[in-house]
Amino acid sequence: MSGFQIVVLWSDVLVWLLLAAGIGLAVLIARNPPLLAAWRRVGSNRIGMASATILLAFIAVGLLDSLHYRVALDGKPGEKTQYAIEVLSALDALVGPLRTENEKTYSAPFASQLYAKETFDRPGVGTVREFPRLKYGASHLQDPAALTGDVAVTALRAGGLALFGWLLLASVVALRCGGWRAVWRGDTAFAWNAVLATLALIVLTLVPLFALAGDYHVFGTDKVGQDVLYQILKSVRTALIIGLVTTLVMLPVAVLLGIVAGYFRGWVDDLIQYLYTVLNSIPGVLLIAAAVLMMQVVIDSHPEWFATAAERADLRLLALCFILGITSWTGLCRLLRGETLKLRELEYIQAAQAFGVSSWRIILRHILPNLMHIVIIALVMDFSGLVLAEAVLSYVGIGVDPTMTSFGTMINNARMELGREPVVWWSLTAAFAAMFILVLAANLFADAVRDAFDPRAA
Amino acid sequence: MLAYILRRLLYAIPILIGVNLITFALFFIVNTPDDMARMQLGIKRVTPEAIEKWKAERGYDKPLFVNAAAGGLGSVTDTIFFEKSARMFVGDFGRAEDGRDIAREIGTRMGPSLAIALPTFILGLFVTVSLALTLAFFRATAFDLWGVVLCVAMMSISGLFYIIGGQYLIAKMWRLVPISGFGDGLDAWRFLILPVVIGVISGIGSSTRWYRTIFLEEVSKDYVRTARAKGLPETVVFFRHILRNALIPILTGVVVVIPLLFMGSLLTESFFGIPGLGSYTIDAIQAQDFAVVRSMVFIGSVLYIVGLILTDISYTLVDPRIRFS
């Protein structure tokens, strides 16, 4: 294996920053008893923990896909090494064959033949039109009729392995938490039974799936013959970035302006209220459309900024996050302003003011911690909406770069396929299903968090 | 009352000016007209003369704010800001890339948009409120629990799926209605029925859940307990007391979107080929027709602000506790 050069895209920086912030927050929570108690309530919520397990699986894929590098090209010794123009990620390296084993065009899931007929010259028979065998999918089989048996055997073998691994993990948990019965019945403080059940579901589907993915295209291939499973995996990172980085971008602005407006009141309040009323008055999609159009002009007129296509797509993704952030901070800002207005009249704040504590210190020490639950709820609630919005925006043509894989671009490329005969259903189904699982998990987790932090709203 | 409405209207003016300034900054200061010309003309045909011609044709060759050369009143009016932005206040939106008058185009496209959006809105409201009321009636039962789970599942499905799936199933597989298109007059109903049904279904999840929360909040209030203590049957308590009181918070969320119904829906209209304002906007976005997008942003904001004012007024009408302070 030749050398490689690490590439750090801007979005990678933000992703890892986000991870660091998450870990920092966890440390902070562990030291703060009331917050810890609230998170314990989340931890005892079965649906919440089951969805958190699924979300963690998605996040793991997203993180793996955020370590980028460029492979060194084979050159003559002594020359300066050249690096490939293509930016790969750790995920690409792990799923290697999925990325490279491309067919000519569509092929159904687990197919051994191509979707379209081709003309062959058979000696003695003449020209015939028939479905050619796939270059990679099921190519290890001599006889396509053995396909079902081979799939079943591989799946069973991998499933057995997965079951063994899961049992090992489950027994570790059972040993530490007072036996199988306690875990099974849910007598543990943390909802281990939900986590373990979800984990079983995940490993029992994913391990056989990936075991099969080596020999087959388990979700089929798309128009240019790319594996759909690979595209789904790549889409996860885009969805996570849109859902999380956007909130990260808008959070400081919303928190700062909301608190300042509520705390200082007067002309500051008027100004901030005016600002968010104006932004709020422009219908979201239209503002995003206008901003994205303008961003496209900027990007197109400065091609010299980007060394690779990946960098351009990446910057466009980040710009989209910024634009979505700018259009979506107003709701949170209004909420925080209202809550600050209430808090500042409370006795402990008045006492602090009477002691001569400076305004910024009061905001930082006494108001901000009491608003954290609103911020956290907003963060998790916004996520699912943003993931769904990405698909719509990409369809309209104002989403991520067309070269970047995302659920939106997948759906957009595949939406005409239902009109074909026979129907090409697999790309659309896979994209919608993956998006549904991600968004459903996020929604359920958001509900659990909201119930734990704000029992009134349940 | 009149003074109240008037004050609300006056308050809208600075907001509209703000919107106007933001769109102007977005379209003319972030990118210069030269950049836009280059983008529109494409890389190959760009020459300084072509750019100048493109700008002159659209009136983008003037200074942004102050035209010193024109002198007198012309130094303010003969500028891009006045011609392109300030004139929107009097309904002059200029011309689209294809040379048509945008204001007239909007006028003709409003009808089809409304023909889809209005039935979707009314039917959707009726369906979701009824469903939410049913869930609240059976609160804390298995029916309620699974109803909420279904709502969460339905709101986790992408809007694109409802449209693509519905089109495939109803129009292509079962061939009940045409896949897309639009007809004039009464004949249009065959084209309208599918987008309306899909629009209603795709909205069920989130709205039902939201209204259910509102109903449940009312259920736990004191007056409900009093009504029950009087011996009223549960149905009377629900329809006479809870429904009426819960309509107030529901109304605030609903009235604000009524004026925006004129704008239609981007996705629905483009998938079903309906010649409304939504598809107009999408076409403009895809063709990078900046003048049309700019106009739609402005109109959208005007309609939203009208919605806010209507909300305030309807609030005072429905809830006698609120005074026009």
Image: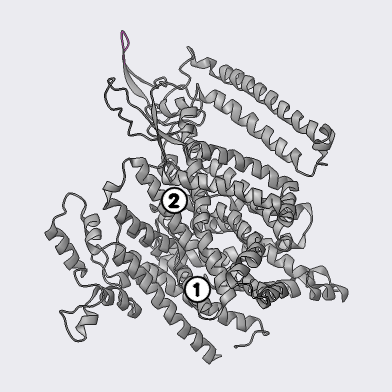
Q: Do tag 1 and tag 2 residues touch (Cβ < 8 Å)?
A: no
SS of the residue under disc 2: loop
Which amino acid is tagged 1? Ile
| Apparent side of residue A3 relative to residue A34 in the rendered image (left or right) | left
Screen quadrant of the C terminus of chain A: bottom right
| Apparent side of residue A238 relative to residue A124 in the rendered image (left or right) | right
* Residue B66, x across and y down, in percent: 23, 78
* Residue A297, x across and y down, in percent: 30, 56
Which residue position is annotated with label 2?
B179
Q: Residues within 10 Å of mark 2 (few under 14, many from 20)?
A: some
Screen quadrant of the N terminus of chain A: top left
- Is B292 above or below relative to A213? below
* Residue A440, x across and y down, in percent: 61, 47
Specify start and end residues of the magenta stretch as a single range: A121-127
Q: In the image shown, does A166 or A281 lie closer to the viewer?
A: A166
Rendered image coloring scheme: one colour
* Residue B104, x across and y down, in percent: 31, 72
Can the viewer see residue A402 in this picture? no
The quarter of the picture where residue A106 lies is top left
Q: Which chain is mark 1 on? A: A
Q: In the image shown, does A191 or B249 lie closer to the viewer?
A: A191
Can the viewer see residue B30 in this picture? yes
For image coordinates 52% across by 49% down, the residue present is: B166
Which amino acid is tagged 2? Ile
Residue at the far top: name it: A124
Which residue position is annotated with label 1?
A272
Q: Is disc 2 on the same chain as disc 1?
A: no
Is residue B242 part of the magenta span, yes or no?
A: no
Q: Residues within 10 Å of mark 1 (few under 14, many from 20)?
A: many
Is residue A124 part of the magenta span, yes or no?
A: yes
For image coordinates 46% across by 45% down, the residue present is: A13
